[in-house]
Image (spheres, grey):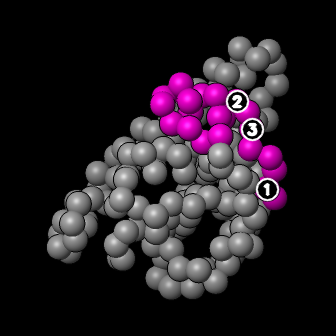
Amino acid sequence: MRYPIRVLFLCTGNSARSQMAEGLLRTVGGADFEVHSAGTEPKELHPLAVEVMRETGIDIAGHKSKPLERFLGQQFDYIITVCDRARDSCPTFPGDNQRIHWGFEDPAAVTGSRAEQLTVFRRVRNEISERLRVWVTVQRKRLKEIGQPV
């Protein structure tokens, strides 16, 4: 494991789930993590993802959707897929990375009123946040065990 821990969140569109995960880990993980996100078929950043993240004090408005190809050949400690389609099409990355799959509902695919869509975006944001808080705690424990500053 390197310091900081390099993480790539991967999703299909890189418009909501992976973007929220990137913003959350940057905030919760701080300097202990170098965080990126990408999509297998990138789409524009979803405005409701920006809105629900802003509600938590995290501004992802400057994020851009990025194609997975931009990161091919780079080494990551963790590749975290947040949707099934990305997991199924994730290419091989160099190095001894760990792949993790956290499947979350795609809030960008939800139809209905704006209020209904916001409800799903908030729920998915909260689910990602809860998962990340536990995961970061475990990673920081591992960093301490190998003598890295935390």
Q: Crowding at label 1, few (<14), some or many (≥20) Cα neighbours within 10 Å?
A: some
**Rendered location of residue 67, percent (x, y):** 75, 64
**Rendered location of residue 120, percent (x, y):** 65, 26
**Rendered location of residue 82, percent (x, y):** 61, 51
Position of residue 64 in the picture relative to residue 32 (left or right): right
Which amino acid, mark 1?
A: Pro
Q: Quadrant of the C terminus?
A: bottom left
Q: Are marks 2 and 3 in contact (CB under 8 Å)?
A: yes
Viewer can see residue 135: no
Separation (CA) of disc 1 from disc 2: 16 Å
Separation (CA) of disc 2 from disc 3: 6 Å
Residue 146 painted magenta: no
Instruction: Give the mark nearest the N terminus, 1 or 2.
Output: 1
Q: Which residue is mark 2?
A: 48
- For this orientation, the residue located farthest to the front is 62
Viewer can see residue 52: yes
Separation (CA) of disc 3 from disc 1: 11 Å
Residue 51 painted magenta: yes
Which amino acid, mark 3?
A: His
Which amino acid, mark 2?
A: Leu
Relative to the observer, which residue lies in front, 131 or 28?
28
Q: Secondary structure at mark 1?
A: loop
Residue range (magenta): 41-61
Q: Residue at image x 46%, y 69%?
A: 6
Q: Crowding at label 2, few (<14), some or many (≥20) Cα neighbours within 10 Å?
A: some
The dot on residue 42 is: 1
The quadrant where residue 114 appears:
top right
The secondary structure that dominates the magenta segment is loop
Relative to the observer, which residue lies in front, 103 or 142?
142
The dot on residue 46 is: 3
